[in-house]
Image (spheres, grey):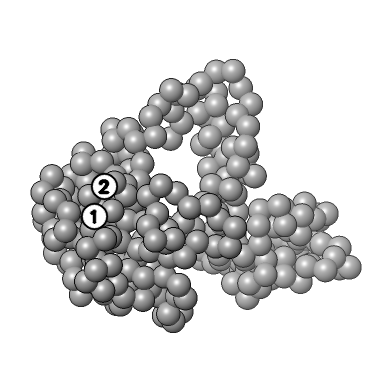
Amino acid sequence: MLRNGNAGSNTASDHIIVLEQALTALPAAWRPDPLTPDAPQVLVRCDTAGATHSFAEACRTAGVGFSFGYPVDARVQDAVDTLNLAAGWYPAIDTDGGIRDGAWVAEATILVNLASWPAGTRLILRKERPHPGAQLRFTDADGMRVTAFITDTEPGVVPGQVAGLELRHRQHARVEDRIRELKATGLGNLPCQSFWANAAWLEIALAAADLVTWARLIGFRSHPTLARAEIATFRYRVLHVAARITRGARQLRLRIDATWRWASAIATAWQTIRTGFG
């Protein structure tokens, strides 16, 4: 969604529009339904800029769960002190389920008043030793970097309890990879003077990024190096390779230089994508 340069980072109305557009883009069978308990479950994850009451209520109305970054204010700092005194912290976990060294999590729902948020909202805290050389912030305590998030996921839903919830929220940072790829795909610089021309450019860049993502996901499953490659690497190895499309004997062929290191992977992906949709 392209916005004016003076748009605020936590404009709830814009976040709600993006949510509605995202849900509309889902196939009907995969959309959440607040009136149907067995409907597909969808979760919205965002950083502190998206943690507004209006956006949380919009998620609840749409039948979507949420996991929002939460500001570390004086109330949260008091909760951290209370948890430190009560030894209420538990080890954080990594993606593989192992203990994350130097990181702990705790639930602070009963220590901070969350009455203004949708019913069932929980507050989860995390503290971790900063990386060597990292500068501490004013909100850090006892040499630990403190972060917080709120979620309406009920206890027992996510494996790992509080640590599992924290891991799930932390994984939303993968969106930064998508943003970086989008900038490398065409959003690094909007080329036009007109807002609406740039809005059209945005749609084209998003379509290009989607095509690349699906091409890697569908065509290069057997070649994980290419499937996980950064867009610049994928562009060099796959998209910019010299090739010709030829027709003969009622066949459509892609002719690639056989000496190209990734020629076999590209040929396999081409065939997989062509036959992947019936």
What residue is pinned by disc 1? Answer: 78
Crowd around label 2: few <14 · some 14–19 · many ≥20 (10 Å) = few
Determine whether 185 is above or below 122 in the image: above
- The residue that appears at 38% across and 29% down in the rendered structure is 8
Residue in the foreground of this view, choosing between 3 and 135: 135
Q: In the rendering, which numbered label is found on residue 243?
A: none
- The residue that appears at 20% across and 41% down in the rendered structure is 53
Badge 1 marks a residue whose secondary structure is helix
- The residue that appears at 45% across and 49% down in the rendered structure is 137
Estimate the x, y position of residue 190 in percent, counting from the top left. 60, 29
**Is residue 91 toward the left or the right of residue 240 in the image?**
left
- CB of mark 2 within 8 Å of CB of mark 1? yes
What residue is pinned by disc 2? Answer: 74
Can residue 85 be seen from the camera position used here?
Answer: yes
Estimate the x, y position of residue 255 in percent, counting from the top left. 81, 61
**Is residue 36 toward the left or the right of residue 236 in the image?**
left
**Mark 1: amino acid:** Asp
Figure quadrant of the N terminus: top left
Estimate the x, y position of residue 24 in percent, counting from the top left. 31, 45
- The residue that appears at 22% across and 50% down in the rendered structure is 75
**Mark 2: amino acid:** Ala
Can residue 68 be seen from the camera position used here?
Answer: no
Estimate the x, y position of residue 147 in percent, counting from the top left. 36, 56
Picture quadrant where residue 39 is located:
bottom left
In this view, the residue farthest toward the bottom is: 98
Picture quadrant where residue 270 is located:
bottom right
Crowd around label 1: few <14 · some 14–19 · many ≥20 (10 Å) = some
**Is residue 39 toward the left or the right of residue 278 in the image?**
left
